[in-house]
Amino acid sequence: MLCSCDLHDKLADVHFKQGMKKLGTGDQAGALDDFSAAIAQNPKLGQAYLYRGYLYLGFSNFVAAVTNFDKAIELEPGNAEVYLNRGIAKHGLKDFGEAMTNFSEAIRIDSENAVAFKYRGVLRTELRDWDGAFADLNQSASLDPDDPEVYRFRAGLQHMRQEYEASVADATEAIDLNDKDAVSYRFRGLGRMRLKDFTNALADLDEAIALSPNDAEAFAGRGAIRVMQGNLEGAEADLSAATRLNSANLTAKVGLGVVKMKRGDLEGALAVFTNVLAIMPPFAYPEIYVDIGELQSILHQNQAALQSLQKAVELDPRKYYGRFWIWLIRTRQHEPAEATRELAEQMAAHPAEPGHEWEGCIGRFLVGDLNETNFLAQAIETARRPTDKDGQLCEGRYYAGMKRLFNGDKAGAVELLRGCVALHQDNKGEYYSALAELRELDQVNKLAN
């Protein structure tokens, strides 16, 4: 005769096996019932807690998942998979410190756990520890080179690092392993957009939308390309679709403002950019304050512009263009010495980072450490890729023109500002400011005559 404890253990084993079978056939609700029944019969069955926690994780019930993983770890403290899954649940709860601890413990227990390296890499990406993230994702790829997700995640990381060629290569690898992954097509399309390979970028984003018709980011990316191509009607349709799918999509909101800019409605663009602040915390997108400040400056709202630009630099000292436009405004307000001293101090305290050599050149030119000839040469020489050259040269001609204007050389300023406009880089505030300056100089010339 079996003792009651043996009977409970056998019943627990039966329920557990039934749960595993149902899990294999996709009957998640049935599997959850069986794992719960197994635990009721044997509360020390660690694997039942693990798989019940795994199911709760799949249901996005992160609190219940953590509770089950806690119990599983109590019963089986050496199981790397439990720490891995508890880390994923903690990540879902935005408890990033505990998530990191759990992923690291899973790796300590099993140094060849590719999935733990992958998820720790994803977490480090979100925490902007890009070097650590890159190392983890590389290790994951070396341990499991057939996992398309790791290449997709690394493509996203490379995009944030502005390594667009590498991002495109990783997204392509992910697509080769899984050609139904909409996000990989989106990443590749966005990378190709940055490389100005618009034809292939559009093809990728079309595919992303075909695979995932509710992907707001794909619509926003396609809209951004159409903005750059001058297809403002198509851009507006895509960007509006993105905002319908996700009313907080910043790319789409800002893109709609850029459409207004390209149509010459600077006041309307400013209103759109200002409204973006209502849907996001200030620290989430400091760049929007630069966009607002540039438009306010062009529209001669100088005090408001200074406040916006100073807010951008306060939130992120790496917003170099915020500093440059502050210099422009203060110099125009007859404070050249103070403006130059302040910019020099800021550039010394927060020098341009690797990959931002051109911004460093602009700062050095404005404070007088680089002459105009060498500065304009650097616009070409520091371009990271050929498609960057016209944009940098437009900016270079603008800042050189403004410096000449402030020094009383109107003829030289007009020549340089016309050179800026001739490059038609109408995604840049410098382009619109150059247009405005030329109009005003023309008016001044007419009055003088």
Image (cartoon, helix red, strand yellow):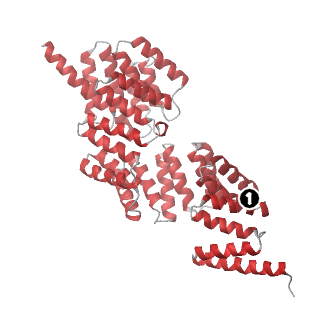
- Kindly give the residue lying farthest to the bottom in the view shown: 1
Pick whichever, 162 or 15, lies toward us: 15
Q: How crowded is mark 1: few (under 14 residues within 10 Å), some or many (20 or more)?
A: some
Quadrant in the picture for residue 34:
bottom right
Residue 65 sits above or below residue 388 on the image: below
Residue pointed to by mark 1: 110
Horizontal side of residue 335 vs 141, given as left or right: left
Pick whichever, 26 or 406, lies toward us: 26
Picture coordinates of residue 231, whole percent (x, y): 25, 48
Quadrant in the picture for residue 200:
bottom left
Q: Is mark 1 on a helix, strand or loop?
A: loop
Looking at the picture, which amino acid does disc 1 mark? Asp
Picture coordinates of residue 49, whole percent (x, y): 71, 67
**Quadrant the C terminus occupies:** top left
Quadrant in the picture for residue 199:
bottom left
Q: Is residue 25 visible?
A: yes
**Quadrant the N terminus occupies:** bottom right
Picture coordinates of residue 334, whole percent (x, y): 35, 12
Residue 283 sits above or below residue 185 on the image: above
Please name the residue shown 60% across and 53% down the image: 93
